[in-house]
Image: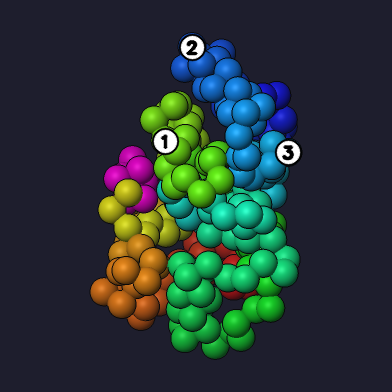
Amino acid sequence: MDVKIAPDWKEILAPEFDKPYFGELTRFVREEYASHRIYPRGSNIFRAFDKCPFDRLKVVIIGQDPYHGPGQANGLCFSVGDGVPFPPSLQNIFKEVADDTGAPVPTTGNLDRWAEQGVLLLNAVLTVREHEAASHAGHGWETFTDAVVRAVAERKEHIVYMLWGSYAQRKGAIADPARNCILKAVHPSPLSAYRGFLGCRHFSRANDYLRSVGKEPIVW
């Protein structure tokens, strides 16, 4: 696995690429791509970083691992490619955006437009076997993405962290609430969304905060 990642992120994360765990992770991922159907395609593994340069980052959203159905994962958490039906969690995200901001439900589930405005759509695990959720958990990705969150927390302030579900909240716990905006809710999954994700108003609250610190709001 070649680490083809946006230059500013590559400089920041360079120490990780030389650590033993990353070498082991690289070997594991290469073997998996050679022997199984893995998502997303290799060129999209680090796409979240390519679409959201470090110097433009304003919002962090943390997912768990990529969608594992054919044609779904595109390298951004919760996002799917153009023309792909919205997975249930994404349906609930768009419902909340519409209820919260009045924006119409979009015709595509591709969240490139968010990333390009400064939203880091980061999965904790960046690859997965087809039809096997969490199949690449525990092989080193979590260590790498912890380093990503730590780098953001240490180098930036006035960032909005949108932490949905206990997993994301644990991973984002390093962010300092005195220097950032920390928004927490249950996961948008249909199993939990009605217990506090729907109605959380995170999207308008994020924009209110960004305006308060002199940053352009996100067009959700």
Q: Is residue 92 above or below residue 4?
A: below
Q: Count residues near mark 2 (Cα–Cα under 10 Å), then give few for <14, some for 14-19, many for 20+.
A: few
User: Residue flagged by tag 2: what amino acid is it?
Assistant: Pro
Taking the image as drawn, is residue 15 in sight? no
Q: Quadrant of the N terminus?
A: top right
Give me the disc on residue 43. 3
Taking the image as drawn, is residue 171 in sight? yes
On the rendered structure, is 200 left or right of 75? left
User: Residue flagged by tag 3: what amino acid is it?
Assistant: Ser
Query: x, y percentage for residue 171?
Result: 35, 43
What's the CA distance linking mark 2 and mark 1? 17 Å
What's the CA distance linking mark 3 and mark 2? 23 Å
What's the CA distance linking mark 1 and mark 3? 20 Å
Q: Earlier in the sequence, mark 2 or mark 1?
A: 2
On the rendered structure, is 198 left or right of 208? left
Query: Is residue 181 within the magenta segment?
Result: no
Q: Earlier in the sequence, mark 3 or mark 2?
A: 2
Query: x, y percentage for residue 113?
Result: 69, 64
Query: x, y percentage for residue 86?
Result: 58, 70
Query: Is residue 172 within the magenta segment?
Result: yes
Give me the disc on residue 20. 2
Contact, mark 3 vs mark 2 (Cβ under 8 Å): no
Give me the disc on residue 203. none
Q: Count residues near mark 3 (Cα–Cα under 10 Å), then give few for <14, some for 14-19, many for 20+.
A: some
Q: Nearer the viewer, mark 3 or mark 2?
A: 3
Q: Is residue 115 above or below residue 143?
A: below
Residue on which the image places disc 1: 137
